[in-house]
């Protein structure tokens, strides 16, 4: 092998190594941030906003990373309204958006229903955070907050069903009833859930 050919092969190998390293950049949950806690309140008005900042294993903000709010671990008890915020793609159980140049994304989810399951926020295939309980003031999953929800709430309060634990306190009581009344007063409906 000539000296020239050997140098050319080494140079090509170097490019290949660099390319492989660059493609291996993935989100690092330890360096990223996510505001989702263990209990999430899902409402037609999308009040419970989740904010994420996606960073890779080098601590560098990831621009244009795909971030999925994944309710598949909760389906079919949870529904997502047919209309969502601009820039998001909806399926029956997921809502997908894209980070900005700072690696940030604000996720406002319009939906209802609740479950004890696994709701995850996933960036480029890596789980950033998760909630084991999803609750909702829209207890009958019809896209609005009204009398039927109050009826179900009363039943859940009697039975201790945490589906009505609207303040994620671990029990159903007066504070949750106050929250439901407030929702019914301020956000009984939303244009995203006709
Ligand atoms: Ca309802
Ligand atoms: Ca509560």
Image (cartoon, grey):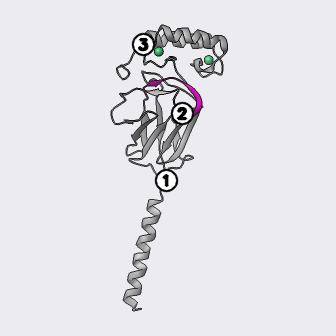
Front residue of 131 and 112: 112
Label 2: few (<14), some (14–19) or many (≥20) C-alpha neighbours in 10 Å: some
Q: What's drawn in magenta, residue-wise?
A: 109-118
The residue to which callout 3 is attached is: 188
Secondary structure of the residue carrying tag 3 is loop
The residue to which callout 2 is attached is: 36
Left or right: where 72 falls relative to 19:
right
Quarter of the image for residue 154 reads top right
Secondary structure of the residue carrying tag 2 is loop
The image shows residue 110 at horizontal and vertical percentages of 42, 26
The image shows residue 171 at horizontal and vertical percentages of 66, 18
Please say whether residue 91 is visible from this viewpoint.
yes
Q: Is residue 44 inside the magenta stretch?
A: no
Q: Nearer the viewer, mark 3 or mark 1?
A: 3
Quarter of the image for residue 45 reads top left
> In the rendered image of this protein, does residue 77 appear above or below residue 142?
below
Secondary structure of the residue carrying tag 1 is loop
Q: Residue at 58% across / 17% down in the picture?
A: 164
The reply to whether the residue tagged 3 has its Cβ within 8 angstroms of ligand 1 is no
> In the rendered image of this protein, does residue 8 appear above or below residue 122?
below
The residue to which callout 1 is attached is: 26
Cα–Cα gap, marks 1 and 2: 20 Å
> In the rendered image of this protein, does residue 95 appear above or below residue 183?
below
């Amino acid at each position: 092998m000539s000296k020239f050919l050997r140098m050319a092969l080494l140079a090509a190998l170097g490019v290949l190594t660099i390319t492989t390293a660059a493609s291996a950049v993935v989100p690092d949950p330890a360096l990223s941030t996510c505001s989702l806690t263990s209990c999430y309140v899902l409402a037609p008005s999308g009040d419970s906003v989740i904010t994420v900042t996606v960073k890779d294993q080098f601590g560098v903000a990831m621009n244009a990373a795909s971030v999925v709010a994944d309710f598949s671990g909760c389906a079919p008890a949870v529904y997502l309204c047919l209309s969502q915020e601009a820039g998001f793609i909806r399926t029956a159980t997921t809502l997908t958006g894209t980070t900005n140049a700072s690696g940030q994304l604000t996720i406002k989810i319009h939906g209802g229903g609740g479950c004890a399951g696994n709701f995850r926020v996933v960036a480029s295939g890596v789980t950033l955070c998760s909630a084991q309980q999803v609750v909702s003031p829209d207890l009958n999953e019809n896209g609005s907050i009204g009398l039927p929800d109050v009826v179900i709430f009363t039943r859940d309060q009697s039975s201790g069903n945490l589906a009505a634990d609207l303040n994620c306190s671990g029990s159903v009581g007066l504070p949750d009833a106050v929250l439901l009344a407030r929702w019914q007063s301020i956000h009984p409906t939303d244009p995203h859930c006709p």
